[in-house]
Amino acid sequence: MKSSKPIAGRYLGYREADRAAPYARFFNPELAPLAPHVCAALDRGGVPDILLPDIDQATTNLFGGEAVLEDGFVLTSDGGMRVSVRSAMPSVTPAMVDWWFGWHGDAASKYKLWHPQAHVHVGWRETPPAGASGRVLYVGQTSIVDEYIGSDLIRGAIRFVPPATLGFTDKSLDDDQQATIICAQIGLGDAPIDIGYLAHHVRAVPGGSEMRSRFWMGGRHVAGRNLIGGMAAVVAKRVLSVTESDARALLVHCAQEMPHLASFLPELFGEFKDAE
Amino acid sequence: MKSSKPIAGRYLGYREADRAAPYARFFNPELAPLAPHVCAALDRGGVPDILLPDIDQATTNLFGGEAVLEDGFVLTSDGGMRVSVRSAMPSVTPAMVDWWFGWHGDAASKYKLWHPQAHVHVGWRETPPAGASGRVLYVGQTSIVDEYIGSDLIRGAIRFVPPATLGFTDKSLDDDQQATIICAQIGLGDAPIDIGYLAHHVRAVPGGSEMRSRFWMGGRHVAGRNLIGGMAAVVAKRVLSVTESDARALLVHCAQEMPHLASFLPELFGEFKDAE
């Protein structure tokens, strides 16, 4: 992964202007320690690729009857990586997470709540439509994010797609009180190049929810979004070869931001779920 | 970082001759496990560079009012690294640490007490003057050390400088009962090339002291100490590009030697503080 330079006026953390936001009290600069199962995955290091299957087997991996490896990373032979991580989300419902993905995307000061030590900026590529109760319908929309993954500042384009696009048609997803799955294609923010996919499956468990995250990045998932992008992707496939540091950093990032989100989401949702 | 070959007569650990030293009973070959906050920093991996600011913001980082990241590492875009680590030092006073930095530098068997699994040799480049009560005035002096950092045997030149040289003029440093800061420029032992800086801030806390260590190494901090060194530095900037392994190894080394020092320093100080 390549680092971008920070843009003037974009910065990490809250400043005076951010503190005026009505939700500012939910900004907590401190992250909880990584969960023991995450540290175990980091200590274990890379796993056999078949334990973290590629996206074409994502349905079986997430919704099959077999126990699967829930936390880990692997560098794939085509220069890409796959990362899986679980996050406990006590007191959170799947519906709250769905609401969050629509709500946070129009203001950096909202986005920063999620990861106070990595999130720099967010904006929708095009203003999304509003649904019932003013909810933002994020599926089909693209969120442009500036965030640190480890030490690298990345400008990413997160294009949220319908779960069925990735083959997720599990019946449990029909009722968003019991489960939801957030799916996106991840691209570069500054070039018409896609670099991978993510899925966050959230299901109700006793006491709250559990999120199971999957990332399929780089390698064969690098593709151009148009003719110029296609030509650039040929180059990008060589340049964007990921390293173990990238895989570890992505795992850590997700394992930090999702429990952090869970720490304030129930209260934030209670207060802002009907607000614009 | 490049490895040096061990020199004949220089070795790791204590041998028969070392055991005759009057302080030999303080040699403990076992290190305590790394502190949980150190393991957390290693698991987390590299962080955004602005969370571990460069040396020109060291004063704000160490003495500012804001909470800062106390344990972590980052590889900088110029090929260098920054490392921060905290060490609990129960029963230690800042004055004891100051005494240690003067006392240990004239004998390998003293230096080895500090890190029994990494310290090989030490000697002053020029014999330092003695102060009151036979104390060695180490500021302004250069300690030539052979030590392993991770798997690499390094010959370093630690040139202790007045704290004001690095901009540290905090009032709390005036009274060495409450705080001290050890500052040094780090160079290669065998070539007139400087490679970075360190600062160890030690402040009294309930039950003892806390050390906050900062290292700014490589990249823009590589410089020649004379004309030949200047020419060599141009080459060194390319050759000495640091890796994540270097950053992790430096963090671990400091996180081992400082708590180990704390484990025997109060008793050693009590017995030898007035000895030559």
Image (cartoon, coloured by chain):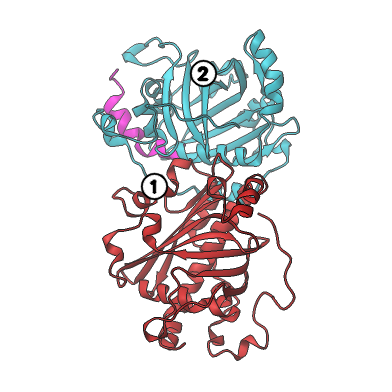
Chain colours: A cyan, B red
Label 2 marks which chain's residue?
A
Q: Residue at x 60, y 77 (%)?
A: B29
Q: Nearer the viewer, residue A48 or B256?
A: B256
Judge whether A211 appears above or below A231 on screen: below
Mark 2 or 1: in front is 1
Q: Residue at x 64, y 13 (%)?
A: A229
Q: Nearer the viewer, residue A268 or B168?
A: B168
Magenta span includes A275: yes
Question: Residue B184: horizontal and vertical position, in percent?
Answer: 47, 62
- Could you say which quadrant of the image residue A227 lies in? top right
Magenta span includes A188: no
Q: Main secondary structure of the magenta part?
A: helix
On the image, numbered disc 1 is attached to which residue?
Answer: B57
User: At label 1, which amino acid type do we have?
Assistant: Gln
Q: Which mark is residue B106?
A: none
Q: CA distance from mark 2 to mark 1?
A: 40 Å
Judge whether B110 appears above or below A75 on screen: below
On the image, numbered disc 2 is attached to which residue?
Answer: A160
Question: Residue A225: horizontal and vertical position, in percent?
Answer: 62, 12
Question: Residue A200: horizontal and vertical position, in percent?
Answer: 53, 29
Label 2: how many residues lie within 10 Å, few (<14), some (14-19) or many (20+)? many
Question: Residue A82: horizontal and vertical position, in percent?
Answer: 65, 33
Q: Residue at x 48, y 14 (%)?
A: A141
Label 1 marks which chain's residue?
B
